[in-house]
Image: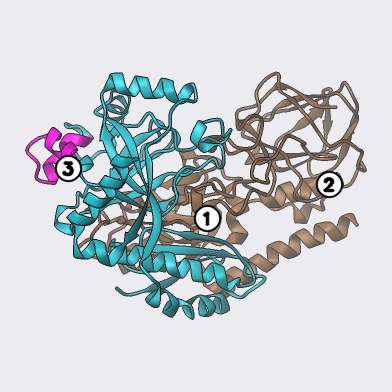
Chain colours: A brown, B cyan
Amino acid sequence: MPLKIIKPGLSTTIQDLGRPGYFHLGIPIGGAMDRYALRAANMLVGNDEGAAGLEAVFMGPEIEFTEDATVAVCGADMPMMVDGEAVEPWTSFDVKSGQTLSFGFLKTGARIYIAVSGGIATPPDLGSRSTYPIGSLGGVEGRPIAEGDVIPIGGGAGKAGRSVPAELRRGPGNPAQLRVLPGLYWNRLTDAAGEGFFEDTWTVAPEADRMGYRFRGGRHLEFVDREQPFGAGADPSNIVDGCYSYGSIQVPGGTEPIVLHRDAVSGGGYFTLGAIISADMDLIGQLQPNTPVNFVKVDMEQSLAARAERKAGLQKIRDALA
Amino acid sequence: MKTRYTFGGDEHIYVEMDEEMSLDAFFKSLSMSNAVRDADIPGVTEICPANASFQVKFDPDVTHPDEMLRRVQELEHKAESAEKRMTTRIIEIPVYYQDPWTHDCVMRFRERHQDPEGTDLSYAARINGYDSVEAFIEAHHSQPWFVSMVGFVAGLPFLYQLVDRDKQLEVPKYLSPRTDTPKHTVGYGGCFSCIYSVRGAGGYQMFGITPMPIYDPEQKTSYLKDFMVFFRPGDIVKWKPIDRAEYDRIEAAVADGSYAPRIAEVDFDLEAFNADMEGTNAKLMEALNAA
């Protein structure tokens, strides 16, 4: 009772909430870029919130169902159809055996999450079905889905017509505001560079993927003069290779900030100026190239308040669907 | 050596044992990260030791970040008093320097390099005061290396050469990271060598390539059947320069399952090493050559 992939989209991967526990070996947690959207989609079809679904970026797949299932799609705004008939986003609907789910052109956001009742049932690697193509783990043979793939699902039916209230459909604004807790190697920057980073408007560069999002357009960051520590390398943005935090912001050469995301490299030799707070990581997953972005400075208490607010949003969805 | 504590967002604590690289900082960082693991603090989800630092990932809903920081800081004294010795293994890794595949990649990303007119090796040789690329390559493989970190991507080792600081080779990372690096590239950045375990992005200078896989998610490679990642912190490596014919022979042997890396069990004691580097390395090599 599998799904048949007629068209895979641009880069559609199987994702759940990731595989914690292997970052010390350079294997990142991975999982849905926008975990809020994946959780919401799973709730709508009655799955465990961490069940594996499909994450499609910029372009949706075309999927033929070979058994009846309940489906929900959350995240980016992308029109979708079952056998050519429009269906609503953030709302569960039934697909009958033999019917085809397809998508139109992306309007806003970047990634959709397709949850199917029973979840995607490909074999897990290191405890997760999440696709990590760099390390050939999870997904279908460690890669994004391809035309002709036959993907097993858990089966069973959910309830159609359940919907996430409009005010709980979270996404980034335009310009997007991403909150940053300064820290890590923040002290490498001059005061003027630190202020400039938050004053300037940046835009998402084309090099933006599951590993990291690159930004450009702000002023060049100047570093505090120092004799480089032994082992770091001569460039003032170099450090002795250390661990990277998820969401940490490195700025190689002081030019283009890179925010590490779910498929982050676990360490490296570029300084980091702090990290995007956990509550805003989902939002990055919905940014298209060229989107203007402002980085907003927050402190730890504000970070934790934002974290609690995101959590409360998910609880409201649970309550609304209960 | 001054320990620095900082938050990486609301889910990470980053502990830098020292700004500079040294084996003392490595051992202190490893000991303290082990102490954090043993302390079993509620909410800790991942502990990642690095060259001269380590990171703790935690759930701030379980333990407040300030409390987590306090509990981690409390363990610093354990790192001060820890033994700086370990039983480990020395491994011979074949390297085909100046190979055609990394050379092709070197040329593709010249605009991101400090020296667009040269190659990574000619640049590294020049800034380290070597007359020729060959003399630099000799310096790279003549003495063994210590794996001081595993990470970046799947099982990639960072290696620190077991020589006096004035003999250490140092190069900057690329001005801007490349979007591509061939699988099994032997790279260099700061004072660290590395092996890119998989193809992908990278910022290190590229010197050569090894035919020996060090990561196999399918666990089909003869020496990776127990676990998909080959290296662990504390491993010692000796590069062995090889030519194209030897590269092809080893690659074929890996493919048919007959390749067995040369490995010997050894003890490494930092104080003994600091007291007599050449003598310690000679003993390590003796153990390797007997394997």
Name above or below for residue B252 compared with residue B105.
Answer: above
Q: Are marks 2 and 3 on the same chain?
A: no
Residue A47: which numbered mark, if any? Answer: 2
Q: Position of residue A296 (x, y in %)?
A: 50, 63
Q: Position of residue A99 (x, y in %)?
A: 86, 23
Give the residue at x 47% y 51%.
A266
Q: Which residue is mark 1?
A: A246
Q: Secondary structure at mark 2?
A: loop
Disc nearest the viewer among 2 and 3: 3
Res A16 visible: yes
Q: Quadrant of the N terminus of chain A?
A: top right
Tell me which corner region of the image, top left, top right, bottom left or bottom right, holds residue A316: bottom right
Q: Which residue is mark 3?
A: B139
Tell me which corner region of the image, top left, top right, bottom left or bottom right, holds residue A198: bottom left
Q: Amino acid at mark 3?
A: Ala
User: Sequence order check: which comes first, mark 2 or mark 1?
Assistant: 2
- Is B133 one of the magenta-colored residues? yes
- Mark 3, chain letter? B
- Front residue (pair B179, A135): A135
Q: Secondary structure at mark 3?
A: helix
- Mark 2, chain letter? A
Name above or below for residue B155 compared with residue B20.
Answer: above
Spatial CA distance of label 2 from label 3 is 58 Å
Q: Position of residue A221 (x, y in %)?
A: 32, 57
Left or right of A221? Residue B154 is: right
Q: Position of residue A271 (x, y in %)?
A: 36, 57
Residue A110: which numbered mark, if any? Answer: none
- Is A173 one of the magenta-colored residues? no
Q: Which residues are magenta?
A: B120-139
Res B7 visible: no
Q: Are marks 1 and 3 on the same chain?
A: no
